[in-house]
Image (cartoon, rainbow, N blue to C red):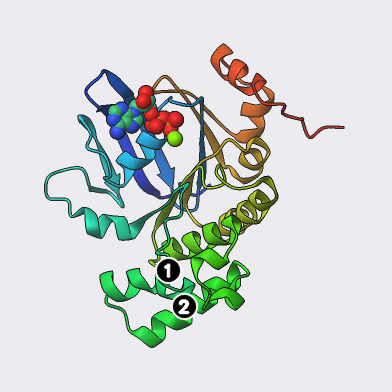
Amino acid sequence: MVQKEKLLEIHHLHKDYGNGPVLKDISLDVHKGEVVVLIGPSGCGKSTFLRCMNGLEQIQSGEILLDGNVITDNKTKWSDVRQKIGMVFQSYELFPHMTVIDNILLGPLKVQKKDKKEAEKEAKELLGRVGLLDKKDAFPRQLSGGQKQRVAIVRALIMRPEILLFDEVTAALDPEMVREVLDVMLELAKAGSTMVIVTHEMQFARAVADRIVFLDGGEIVEMDAPEKFFTQPKTDRARRFLNTFTFKKKEG
Ligand code: ADP
Ligand code: MG
């Protein structure tokens, strides 16, 4: 078997906001094309972990490498790194006074200085991929939450990141809109995107993940293939966490 290429490496990460440790000695490799799903109870450090990965939070010790290069030393230009590590948040934060396509084009035109025609073509392709080409000239207020979140995903994708981080992107959506956003992420996974996803949607986690990372109290407690993790969790902590979901096994 071919050894998969490491895209993102996290070594012995420690994070503290000043009131005691939030992430304690976290190490994790994310391979090219891999989908890692981070799960764990509220407050266990999932968002902090994602935010550390793209420099939105300072870390106290440890290091992070992207493509084999350290990105946590003081030479790091985070504005460059963030073009390679895209992030989608729970709140999509589109600019309300700009149309969908102008929101999407902001990064490629202002940050990456891409050619306008070329960027527009790409934006339309991506909007088509998430089923929103007909909304390109709409304003955010004219879209549903699910549609806005799909636009936010396109806004991240158009930067052509090497890896995408998703932080509970369906948590604020009405239930009927969750599916359409999860489907876009499943589609990205199928197309070979490298992703780290934080979610409370356990069925989705099981379906999309190559690996589940269970975080509790700022530590990685378990790391396993999804089928293994959901059917035979190794620790009481994981079992207790899974029991808080009315999780139906896909058996029989
Ligand atoms: P999760 O995403 O798993 O719910 P978070 O990463 O948001 O967890 O939070 C982990 C811990 O860090 C919590 O105890 C939270 O209160 C604390 N925390 C998060 N952000 C900050 C911050 N900006 N300042 C201080 N403490 C924070
Ligand atoms: Mg969070």
> Residue 215, labelled with which disc?
none
Q: Residue 229 at what x, y percent from top left?
A: 61, 27
In the image, what residue type sits under mark 2?
Glu
Q: Residue 81 at what x, y percent from top left?
A: 27, 55
Above/below status of 16 relative to 186: above
Q: Residues within 10 Å of mark 2 (few under 14, many from 20)?
A: some
**In the picture, which quadrant includes the C terminus?**
top right
Q: State whether residue 165 appears in this view.
A: yes
Residue drawn 76% across the image and 30% down it: 248
Q: Residue 56 at what x, y percent from top left?
A: 28, 44
Q: Which quadrant of the figure shows ligand 2? A: top left
Ligand 2 contact, mark 2 (Cβ < 8 Å): no
Residue drawn 39% across the image and 74% down it: 105
In three-dimensional space, the C-alpha distance between marks 2 and 1, rounded to whole angstroms, equals: 7 Å
Q: Residue 100 at what x, y percent from top left?
A: 48, 71
Horizontally, is 196 left or right of 73 in the view? Answer: right
Residue farthest along the bottom direction in this orientation: 117
Above/below status of 165 relative to 184: above
Kindly identify which residue carries mark 2.
122
Nearest the eye: 187 or 107: 107
In the image, what residue type sits under mark 1?
Ile
In the figure, residue 117 lies in which quadrant? bottom left
Kindly identify which residue carries mark 1.
158
Check if mark 2's residue and mark 1's residue have beta carbons within 8 Å. yes
- Secondary element at tag 1: loop
